[in-house]
Amino acid sequence: MKQTFFKHARPVFLAGCADRLNTFASFRAVTPIPRDAVLYITASTFYRLKLNGILIAFGPARTAKGYARVDEIPLGTYAYEGTSEIVIEVAGYACASLSTVRQSSFLITELRTNNSILLTSEDFTAYEPSQKLREVRRYSYQRHFGEVWDMRNGNALLDSDRRPLEVLDLDITFLPRTAPYPYYGARTLTAASSVGTLTYDETRPYRANPYSVFPLPDGWGSFDQNSIRFNPYQWISRHRQAPKSGTCSLPVTLRENEYAIMDFERIECGFMQATLCAYEESEVILAFSEDGAPEQFSFTNMNAETAWVTLLAKGQKLCQTTFEPYTFRYVMVAVKRGAITLDALGVIGYTYDMRDAAIPACDDPVLNAVCRGAARTFAHNAVDLYMDCPSRERAGWLCDSYFTAKTEYALFGKVPLEDAYLENFRLYRNEGAFPDGVLPMCYPSDPEPYKNGFNKFIPQWNMWYVIELADYLTKRNPEVDRELYRESVERFMAFLKGYENEDGLLERLPSWNFVEWSSANNWTWDVNYPTNFLYAKTLESYYRIFGDERDLKRSREVQKTAEAQAFGGEYFMDHAIRDENGKLILQKDSSEAGQYYAILFGDIDLSAPKYRELYRLVTEVFAAKRRAPKPEILEINAFIGVYLRLEALQKLGEYDLLLRDIKEFFGAMEVETGTLWEYRQRNGSRDHGFASYALVAIQNALKHKHDKQ
């Protein structure tokens, strides 16, 4: 094991449990803590640090397999006079996911001053708290396990839960935390928006498995359904709600089959916290959602078990906080059995610290609202890496990151989170999960089984990695040694070279080809022209990083060939397929997104007479909401079509159209949730990282309009 951050500490965990599914461990020590004491700490999968019962930190920042990022926490700042109690809880999930890498669970920590080591991992007493149930449903296949807490014996660590400690021999390389430390701002509600009763209704439609749309891959890691005692999502779904009162100040008393709906009025991200008092032995379900209404709770349609359970003894009062961060606007507190008083409900935020953010301001109230929503969306999706959403997945997807990185730079003029995010991909080592040279589509993550013998990856998303990297190394952080990235880029470019056809275009790329969330994804076989325009941009980016003129020349060749083959006289077609004689035949299928790929990456001059009709379509017909029918060209979806359009309008200098589209597409979102969404429709995440790019587009438009004055 490579020792760099720890002088004497070694990784530990509950004996025999380092690779056991969903193991929750607590490590406790009572010690004096000098004012200059610093705690060095990291773990797998996540840790929560409490000092004298107060949350101090949640971590670590996620990174590549075989690595761990070390947090340095000035613990003396928070310590009592005399002795203090340190409790470190570790969720060792030991399962596959899209939000972390599966590896052995461990904790390694060292408390020290400049002069001495005060504690190491081996000095802690280890527990397996009986309060947190192990055999529970997964929250989603992209994340890990849900939370069921049995607090009937209190929330203190029990002697009966003590376990022997095991020192582990793990091959770990320690890294510094590059991402900024998160912001833990708290918010507490003082009233319920409605109170009502629940009635079982066997006719109500429900999902026995809330993530059945995305079934768990074999070997992904889960418990047999027969061993799972609690199904809160199911229980809420099968009960009809009957409101009996409106706004009601807390505390509020709830008996069996009664509920209160709490409305935060905007989406919040963090650790949910409920203060409850039980009159009888009680089972309480706290369901949460980004969708719904103050008087009628409904789950967001996003394939995740967004509910947790706590069990209380008669007469018990406690303040219960979720271990994991969640995302919600509405929370239903429902009593399945027993009777309780709900004294308080709140959230401890887990976000990027936005106190120094430069959020654009303008005279238009809608644009100002979109900027506010974009900034909150960024904060929720940029804690330790760029995420797609802070709810269902918390996964670090390429392509999404191309847009989110621009937001970080616009807000702060620096990109410490992008530093960490791209380093994670650079450190990835392919252990045979993908063809040589291919990177995961999101990371840290585990390879997901797919068809045709491949694990799932997106060739186009690997191209976006190269494109983002070129901007990062030449614009946002040119001080970084680009040679660090040479291997990851060159190996991927060699992979693409193997799929060039006789015309020099990419053909029949394997695995999941992704152009946009629309039927345009059905047109990726044999030769897809949006993909080849993207390939031209990738080759140009390769040149920008390493300076080989041959790559720039190849980029121009791909542009010219793709343009010559795909342009149909008025606009671009999406694909060509080979006939029985092996000849490529251009198809009539065309997407609006495909036009933007050509405009952005095809060296297309829309002022030329040849493209007069395409320019008219872009400026007079296409829009965030289409101005006139054009059924022969498939309309864009939110991702990535809308964002390609925003980029294209900037390239064309159409800033008034740009601001119009932003207001039409995003304006109502901020009003409803305070965030920007994955889709224009009311499904999926309503708080999606790439959507924060709207702020960048607004900022660029305002700067351009200011410069013209």
Image (cartoon, grey):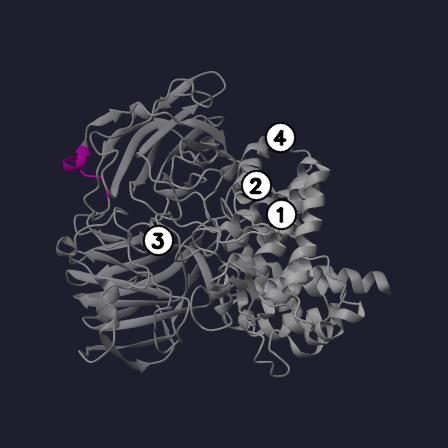
Q: Secondary structure at mark 2?
A: helix
Q: Dot 3: what SS? A: loop
Q: Are marks 2 and 1 in contact (CB under 8 Å)?
A: yes
Going from the N terminus, do you reach mark 1 or mark 3 first? Answer: 3
Q: Which residue is mark 3?
A: 451
Q: Are circles 3 and 2 on residues that touch, CB within 8 Å?
A: no
Q: Earlier in the sequence, mark 1 or mark 4?
A: 4
- Label 1 sits on what residue type? Thr
Structural crowding at the residue carrying mark 1, measured as other residues with C-alpha within 10 Å and reported as few (<14), some (14–19) or many (≥20): many
Can residue 360 be seen here? The reply is no
Which residues make up the magenta segment? 156-162
Q: Which residue is mark 2?
A: 493
Residue farthest along the top direction in this orientation = 115
Q: Amino acid at mark 2?
A: Met
Q: In the image, what residue occupies the spot 56% across and 70% down?
A: 636
**For residue 662, which quarter of the picture?**
bottom right
Q: Tag 1's secondary structure?
A: helix
Dividing the picture into quadrants, the one containing residue 565 is bottom right
Residues 403 and 122: in front is 403
Q: Is residue 196 above or below residue 352?
A: below
Residue ranking furthest to the right: 709
x and y percentages locating residue 203 in the rendered image = 20, 80
Disc 2 and disc 4: Cα gap in Å? 15 Å
Q: Is residue 406 visible?
A: yes
Residue 697 drawn at (x, y percent): 67, 61
Q: CA distance from mark 1 to mark 3?
A: 26 Å
The Cα–Cα distance between marks 3 and 2, rounded to whole angstroms, is 23 Å
Q: Identify the mark at residue 483; answer none if there is no mark.
A: 4
Amino acid carrying mark 4 in the image: Glu
